[in-house]
Image: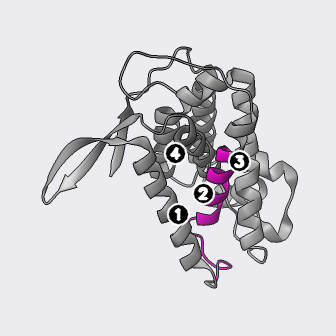
Amino acid sequence: MIPLRDTQPSYTFPFVTVAIIVLNVAAFLYEFSMDPYELNFFIAHYGVIPTRFQWMDVLTSIFLHGGWMHLIGNMWFLWIYGDNVEDILGHSQYLLFYLLCGVAATMVHVAFNADSRVPTIGASGAIAGVMGAYVVKFPHSRITTLVPITIFLTTVDIPAYFILLYWFVIQFFSGVGSVGHSHLSQGGVAWFAHVGGFLAGVVLILVMRTEQRWSHGPGSRW
């Protein structure tokens, strides 16, 4: 299932979400300009390596990506869900929220992979936090989703709570299944970073001040 768009209206322009997307794309284009040796050194220097943990790497790592699909997938999810979360938090508070979710996601990943020497990069954990906030505040928003049916593709409007909780369950059990496997010599998906970021988003959106938004459309009032 591939989410295409949501039905929840946004009442302000998502300046921070757009800026985050631009920064991520710019960082990736810079990575793309490097030769393989330079790129490996760059990722090792600015990614998070649990056995050589440094706080500054937490910030830099969430703006780096390992390939085009990694970048596009993350930015697409951020674009779908980020504008509404930014709308209710306000621009400054949303930026703080995003960074805190990224930090929480990274710390959970490090806790479950303390012996790993593999650099971890990507905005997935921070974006998982945005998704967690979205499911709390807009559970009945409809997500237009591309769904394969046999050899055909069709779109279906799915409640946000269903598609986002389904995504979370997949991340959780994938993370549980990865426990005990070695991450020292090869990379992979940081499943528990997704779980940690999502849960951080749920908690933070409940304790942070948010603006109340109203719409006459179905499923968009909270």
Q: CA distance from mark 2 to mark 3?
A: 9 Å
- The residue wearing badge 2 is 194
Q: Earlier in the sequence, mark 1 or mark 3?
A: 3
Which amino acid type is shown beneath numbered disc 1? Gln
Q: CA distance from mark 2 to mark 4?
A: 12 Å
Q: Earlier in the sequence, mark 2 or mark 3?
A: 3
Q: CA distance from mark 1 to mark 3?
A: 16 Å
Tag nearer the camera, 1 or 3: 1
Tag nearer the camera, 1 or 4: 1
Q: CA distance from mark 1 to mark 4?
A: 15 Å
Tag nearer the camera, 2 or 4: 2
Tag nearer the camera, 3 or 4: 3
- Identify the element where label 3 is drawn: helix
Q: CA distance from mark 2 to mark 1?
A: 7 Å
Residue 190 shows in the view:
no
Question: How was the colour assigned to the protein in this rendering?
Answer: one colour
Q: Is residue 166 left or right of residue 125?
A: left
Q: Are marks 2 and 1 in contact (CB under 8 Å)?
A: yes
Q: Are marks 2 and 4 in contact (CB under 8 Å)?
A: no
- The residue wearing badge 4 is 74
- The residue wearing badge 3 is 102
Whole-percent x, y for residue 178 in the image: 57, 77
